[in-house]
Amino acid sequence: MKSDSRPIGIFDSGIGGLTVAAAINDLMPHERLIYFGDTAHLPYGEKSAKTIQGYSEKISDFLLKQDCKAIVIACNSASATAYPTVRKSTPKEVPVINVIDPTVAYVSKKYPFGKIGVIGTKATVNSRSYAKRIQKANPQLSVSMLATPLLVAMIEEGFFNNNISQAIINNYLEKNTLSKIKALILGCTHFPLIKGEVAKYYRGSAEVIDSSTIVAQSLKAEVQKRGLLSSDLSGLHHFYVSEKTNSFEQSTKLFFGEKLKLEKKRLP
């Protein structure tokens, strides 16, 4: 079988996309990853669609110049507002995976009817991407979305898994918007890091959906279909950041150990 050793490109505004990168690494251990965390401009969720589109196009262009064979938009805000922009500017032979569509497919198939909740950034919620796509896929489902802007900053600072973070999370989840839901989509790639705290609130009454594994499975299927799989890992994963932060460096080591290269790279 032919092996394609070119890397897979992944980007996000900060550490959140590392949850997707880690899931891809677990599922596809022979693939080399190039990750770009746009830490100088985080959080994307507070920015306009036009601004996010501009950043996303520059980052995807950078990843293509690194000879990436696939692009993963590991950010819900960018997936919601910039996917068409990135897809249009990327050669057709290079697959572009966003984090919303695979999750929508999973939910609309698993739940024939009922209410689905989504928490995310203001950009993701204002775009109503999840609501529109889920209801298009399954009109029997209703979708309630809630912006939870404090959570991204909290996670970026490494401030979670304690009594104060649990209180903030509970305060959001108690809103009437999310009452009587069958499942809650963690509509931000930062949020798998607080999945345990969210699950603690629901105590099994609602499924807490972490999109990282779903996205990794979708990527593998697409890469496999196109004959782009690698059969042998060659070289270290390479992580670029537009601004070095302690939380990013600590998080990469948490997910990937010492088998990585971290480098600062400003966007043009």
Image (tube, rainbow, N blue to C red):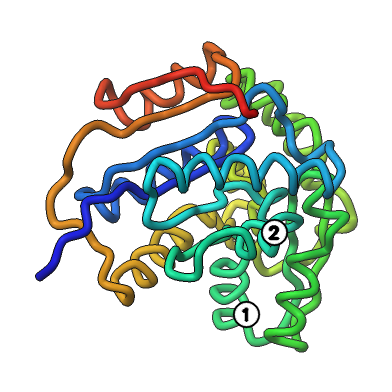
Residue 25 located left or right of residue 210: left
On the image, which quarter does residue 209 sit in? bottom right
The image shows residue 77 at horizontal and vertical percentages of: 72, 49
| Image position of 140 with respect to 108: above or below | below
Of circles 2 and 1, the one toward us is 2
Mark 1 lies on residue = 108
Residue 140 vs residue 217, the one in the foreground:
217
- Residue at horizontal 64 percent and vertical 28 percent from the top: 268
Name of the residue lying farthest toward the top: 246
Number of on-image labels: 2
Residue 54 vs residue 123, the one in the foreground:
54
| Image position of 156 with respect to 59: above or below | above
Q: Residues within 10 Å of mark 2 (few under 14, many from 20)?
A: some
- Residue at horizontal 55 percent and vertical 79 percent from the top: 110
Quadrant in which the N terminus is drawn: bottom left
Q: Are the residues flagged by discs 2 and 1 in contact, CB closer than 8 Å? A: no
Q: Amino acid at mark 2?
A: Thr
The image shows residue 61 at horizontal and vertical percentages of: 55, 45
- Residue at horizontal 51 percent and vertical 34 percent from the top: 36
| Image position of 212 with respect to 14: above or below | below
Residue 195 visible here: no
Mark 2 lies on residue = 85
Residue 240 visible here: yes
Residue 122 located left or right of residue 231: right
The image shows residue 138 at horizontal and vertical percentages of: 70, 86
